[in-house]
Amino acid sequence: MPIYQTRGELPRKRHQVLRRPDGELYREELVGNYGFNGPSSLLYHTEQPTAVVDTRWVADMTPVQAPSKDHRNRHFRTSPIPHGGNWVQQRTPLLFNDDVVISIARPTEAGDFCYRNGEGDELLYVADGEGVLETAFGLIEYRREDYLVIPRGIVHRLVPKQGVEHCVLVHEFRGHVTTPRRYKNQQGQLKEGSPFSERDLRTPQDLFQRSGPATVMVKHAGQLHEYSLAHHPFDVVGWDGYYFPYAFNARDFEPLVGRYHLPPPVHQTFEAEGAVICTFAPRPFDFGEGAIPAPYAHSNAMSDEVIFYASKEFMSRKGVEYGSITLHPDGVPHGPQPGKTEASIGATWTDELAIMCDTFRPLKVAEGAVEYEDEGYFTSWVE
């Protein structure tokens, strides 16, 4: 994000001496991506962040492709995915390729560890739930319908509020998640006319410190490893830079509408290497004379389309439910199901809320997704 942030105690110059009250040095840590060429932030720790006491391998997190490789439109009902466990180890992968893994998590606890994804950025959509995202950069309180953007390498801990059911749509991207380039000027600021602005993004607040030993789970090359650290990674007294986690609520997306139907890119919210994310937010329908609000049938040339239905309503689809996920792959046309085009004519408003991920490489169905599939979905366009 092209936004400069600063928190806590800092020396006047980068890489300049900054001492603790006892005279010892605070320890710098540069966190960023693309080596030393991408966005970064500089953190000041009370103790050395590199003091590793022990490591051990925990699990293979690589998704496994389902045996059936049928090429068809698919529908997964995710509501039966069980609640339990933490937000890292209890993820159920549904779809994946070399650019992204799409999973559902229903955590009931934070776990006694922090987490660092060492192979990609994470984009979480909190369909249900509320709590606190703890990071070395500070706290972010999250709520229902929040996106949480957590760049690669940032240590964090998702702490669900007790007694509040969670459903989290998880995207793990190989590339950096950012706001769309077409929304930004040469300086990187979101332009007037974009569907949201920097004012809508909630950055970490309230630096807090933890001390003593800590456990950090690190994901790298599909493997989950446990690191035992001599010092807690949340012992930061100050930081500044351009690389940090943030939250954005889907209800703060300002939809672009026209007299006649506009294509899905007007709903784009984020982009990453090999994929885009769109938010279909509540909005007025197309208002031209004779306008057809429902989308026209289309073939997904060079992309696979995944939609997570975050409300019970969706103007062009029937047979889906809250929490459903559909996959419409490249090479197969899809569009409104029978009766939905006619039903949309004359409608003035939709309360739908859905999250779409379009990928530019084919997606594979994960082994664990099969038991949640509505196997007859691909025939649902037959009248």
Image (spheres, rainbow, N blue to C red):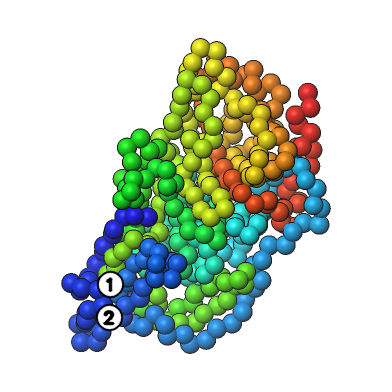
Pointer 1: what residue? 237
Q: Is residue 329 above or below residue 243?
A: above
Q: Position of residue 130 (x, y in %)?
A: 45, 51
In what quadrant of the picture does the N terminus appear?
Answer: bottom left
Res. 300 image quadrant? top right
- Looking at the rendered structure, the secondary structure element under dot 1 is strand
Within 10 angstroms of label 2, few (less than 14), some, or many (20 or more) residues?
A: many
Q: In the rendered view, tell whether residue 297 sits above or below residue 292.
A: below
Is residue 111 among what the camera can see?
no
Q: Nearer the viewer, residue 238 or 182?
A: 182
Expressed as whole percent of the image width and height from the top left, the position of residue 142 reads 42, 52
Q: Residue furthest top?
A: 289
> Left or right: 8 with respect to 248?
left
Q: What is the spatial separation of the Cα atoms under label 1 and label 2, in whole angstroms?
A: 9 Å
Classed neighbour count for the residue bearing mark 1: other residues with Cα under 10 Å, few (<14), some (14–19), many (≥20): many
Q: Are marks 1 and 2 in contact (CB under 8 Å)?
A: yes
